[in-house]
Amino acid sequence: MDTAPDSSNLAGVRHIILVLSGKGGVGKSTISTQIALALRHAGKKVGILDVDLCGPSIPRMLNAHGKDVHQCDSGWVPVYVDQEKSISLMSIGFLLERPDDAVVWRGPKKNAMIKQFVADVAWGHLDFLIIDTPPGTSDEHISTVDALRPFNPTGAVLVTTPQAVSIGDVRRELTFCKKMGLRVLGIVENMSGFVCPHCTECTNIFSKGGGEELARHAGVPFLGCVPLDPTLAQSLEQGKDFIQEFPKSAAYSSITNIVQQILDSVSQGS
């Protein structure tokens, strides 16, 4: 990247955190949005960069779909999710003519788009930039980490589900982080039990504890479990702020605890 870090659009960003998963369907975008919302409620100014080019779901999750991206002297102006402009968002979903258009691109074009996202979005001053990545450990991930390297990304949060197949994929993601020199802030076990909407009892539909076991073996922090919670699913479908709407839910306490650990880790590492 030609731009020097001190004159870049990322110069005003204090902490860059990537959210990674080894496989699809683990709720990585859900975790990304909830981390961003919880950070906002902790008084932080947050940006989200959605580099999941083939599955840009975050605009819908934050009720920002259909909005337009504008240009300024520094590049693209991100879409603001709330009136206070405390969460800003950039996604290829804003650049498609129709929301159902498929992104049928080969690797080089995807990589060029990611580099443009990193270089050309005018984020301004942010406490945190959350990077929501596609599943896997291939081209897009290498391009993202390489493009961010001059700005010393803070680290990565790895998302898994309790099943053994997902745990195995996250083990490969840990190897990716090690090879790329990316600090692992911790592992989140998503879909860890189902919260009954009537009695609020949590039942382990899948298994439980695989993420914690993997974290222990890998010597990285285990940030916590997030259960399958119907109120969280409802909030994502309707584009509502789950952290604000359901402070008494089981998932709320899980998410806020995870974010507090991230804040503690960042303050210790800075």
Image (tube, rainbow, N blue to C red):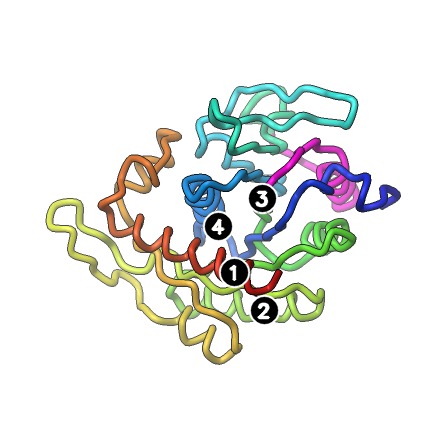
Give the amino acid type for the residue marked by disc 3 in the picture: Asp
Residue 104 lies in magenta, yes or no? yes
Mark nearer the N terminus (3 vs 4): 4
Say the numbered circle drawn on residue 28. Answer: 4
> Which residue matches tag 3?
127
Local SS, label 4: helix
Secondary structure beneath label 2: helix
Q: Say which amino acid is labelled 4.
A: Lys
Q: Are marks 3 and 4 in contact (CB under 8 Å)?
A: no
Marking on residue 174: 2
Nearer to us in this view, 43 or 100: 43
Of the numbered discs 1 and 2, the one sitting upstream in the chain is 1
Relative vertical location of residue 228 with respect to residue 189 in this rendering, above or below: above
For label 2, the crowd category at 10 Å Cα-Cα, with few meaning under 14, some 14 to 19 and many 20 or more, is many
- Dot 3: what SS? strand
Q: CA distance from mark 1 to mark 2?
A: 8 Å
CA gap between label 3 and label 1 equals: 20 Å
Mark toward the viewer: 2 or 3: 3
Q: Secondary structure at mark 1?
A: strand
Nearest-to-viewer mark from 3 and 1: 3
Which label belongs to residue 158? Answer: 1
Sequence-wise, the earlier of marks 2 and 3 is 3
Q: Report the Cα–Cα distance between label 2 and label 3.
A: 25 Å
Task: Give the magenta range.
Answer: 102-127
Q: CA distance from mark 3 to mark 4?
A: 21 Å
Tell me where residue 64 appears, x and y as whole percent: 49, 26
